[in-house]
Every structure is written in C-alpha cells, then in structure tokens.
Amino acid sequence: MSGEFNETYITLGGFEGMENYRYLYFILVLTLCILSIYSNAIIVYIIWEHQNLHESMYIFIAALSVNSLLVSINIYPKLLIDFLSEKQTVSYSVCLLQYFLCYCLGIVDLLLLAAMAFDRYVSICKPLVYPNIMTNRTVVVVLVFAWFVPASQMSVSTVLSAKQKVCHFVIKGFFCTNSIFKLHCVNSKVISVFGLVSCMFILGICPVFFVLFTYARILFIVYKSSNDVRQKAAETCLPHLLVLLCFTALGTYDVVFVVLYNPLFNPIIYGFKMKEIFKRLKKLFGPQVRHTHTHI
C-alpha cells in the first residue's frame, strides 16, 4: 500500500478478457444509461406535474425513481469510462464512496417498498382512517427515514473500512461492492458483525419480510371482499410485488442488480402497470406518435 491514502489504486478485475468487445459493451451500457435516466426522469416529471398524483403512493414511486437516478449516476459514468480505458483502476477513496452509495441506495429501495406496502395495506384494509394516517407529515417522515437511516448505517461501515490497511489491490468485479473487504490485510470481525446484523438483517431482511407479511394480510382480506376491492388491490399492489420479486431475485447478482434492474425495471413496471401514470404517459407521447405516423 502507498504511503498516502489517496495514492492507493485498486484494479477492477471484472474487465479482464473483454478488450475485443469493449466498444460493443460501451454502446450497450450507454444505451441502458440513457434509457434508465430518461425513463426515471419522465416518471418523476409526471408525478411532479400533475396535482392529482400528489398522493402518498405516487410520491413513494417518485422517490423510488429518484433513487434509481442516483444509482445510475453512481454506476454508469465510471463503467462507461472503464470500457474505453486501457487500465480499469479506481482510487481506494472513490471505491469506498461507490461501495457506500451502492448499498445505501439498495437499502433505500427496500425501505421505500416497505413504505408502499404499508400505504397499500392502510388504503385497502383500513380506508376510513387512511387520510388520517397517511398525511403529508407521515410521508415526509417516512422519506427522511428511508434515506437518512441507511446513510447513517453505511457511513459507519465505510469509515471502519477506510481505517483498515489494504494489502490486496485487485477486485473481481466491475465496481466496488462488499468485495472491498477482501482488500484488507486482516478481516475485521467488527465490520463483519456490524454489516450482518445492522445493514443486512435489520435494514435488509426485515423490510422484505414486512412487505411479504403486509401483502399476505392484504390478500387474506381482499379474498373475502367484493370484486371492486379485489380489482383495486390487484391494480395497485401488483406493480409493487413485481418490483419486490425482481429486487430479491436479481439482488444476489451485483452487476445485474445495480446496472440493469434498479435504474431500468422500476419505470417500466410502474409506467405500464399503474393506470394513472400510464394514462399520462400516453397523453405525453400520444401527440408525438400521431405526428410521426402522419409523416410516415
């Protein structure tokens, strides 16, 4: 390790053997980058622009899209630069920042999905008290909690990692994840226990089980309800469940999860499955589509 912290550089080993196809991968990743940023920005714009979408459910969807934009900013620029570079390296300080943002934003997604599940539960199962529970104040508190708590937890893990001595300088991946722990000369039990108990269990597994329990309760209640209630539950809950299933299924694969799922799947699912958002998407792009067909 170099004597100065900011002079320590890590080699990203995931690019090994991809030299002959790097321009192809660059075009593919650039396309994903543009699509993810554009689609999430459109979702945020639609919800921001239309007053009747300023409800808790849509605000949480907008927050999820903002979170996806942050993921894109964290991952795509460095990834695109690396595909065009002869050597794929990153300073240890930037590596720690990327690790912090990667897991912090991932946990934010889980907490927002948990908030959406609670919102749907109150809306469908306790409609009379829904306006009193899901107030603007409640929404603000939930959003602050969803971003502040993961940032606080991940800050501790990142600071502890920054104090560790580095003896290895190659990461087997395209960007910095928890593989940074393998760079340390000595495995820290404090970091391992803190990450397992605090970040993974409390902020990772617990929200997933909360979401599953909440939707199980919703399913149990709507099963005994009228067809209208069932239809409403299906229209509003199905997109959230699809997002959660994609999150848990792909979350074990860092590259797929961060680069493809998080920034791109959310706007696709909510854009096509949420009736109010899809209606405004058609209004937004409808004139352009008709104008194109006229010229053709």
Image: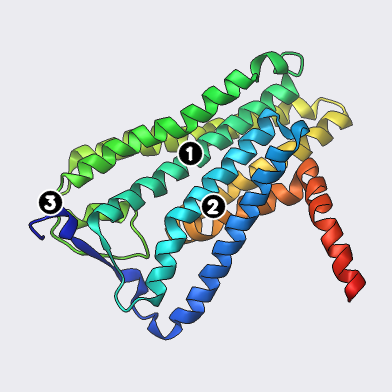
Between the residue at mark 3 and the residue at mark 1, the CA separation in whole angstroms equals 29 Å
Q: Residue at x 58, y 69 (%)?
A: 31
- Point out residue 7 in the picture as x, y percentages from the top left corner: 16, 60
- Judged from the image, the secondary structure of the residue bearing numbered disc 3 is loop
Say which amino acid is labelled 3. Answer: Lys
Give whichever of 254, 149 is nearer the camera: 149
- Dividing the picture into quadrants, the one containing residue 188 is top left
In the rendered image, the quadrant that contains the C terminus is bottom right
- Judged from the image, the secondary structure of the residue bearing numbered disc 1 is helix
Alpha-carbon neighbours of circle 1 within 10 Å: few (<14), some, or many (≥20)? many
Residue at the disc numbered 1: 108
Between the residue at mark 1 and the residue at mark 2, the CA separation in whole angstroms equals 11 Å
- Judged from the image, the secondary structure of the residue bearing numbered disc 2 is helix
Residue at the disc numbered 2: 262
- Dividing the picture into quadrants, the one containing residue 211 is top right
Of the image marks 3 and 2, the number of the one nearer the N terminus: 3
Q: Residue at x 72, y 50 (%)?
A: 271
Say which amino acid is labelled 1. Answer: Val
Side of 89 relative to 139 (left or right): left
Residue at the disc numbered 3: 165
> Residue farthest to the left?
3
Side of 245 relative to 187 (left or right): right
Say which amino acid is labelled 2. Answer: Asn
- Point out residue 205 in the picture as x, y percentages from the top left corner: 45, 37
Q: Are marks 1 and 2 in contact (CB under 8 Å)?
A: no
Q: Residue at x 17, y 48 (%)?
A: 187
- Dividing the picture into quadrants, the one containing residue 118 is top right
Side of 129 relative to 140 (left or right): right
Between the residue at mark 3 and the residue at mark 2, the CA separation in whole angstroms equals 32 Å
- Point out residue 90 in the picture as x, y percentages from the top left corner: 28, 63
> Residue farthest to the bottom?
20
Of the image marks 3 and 1, the number of the one nearer the N terminus: 1
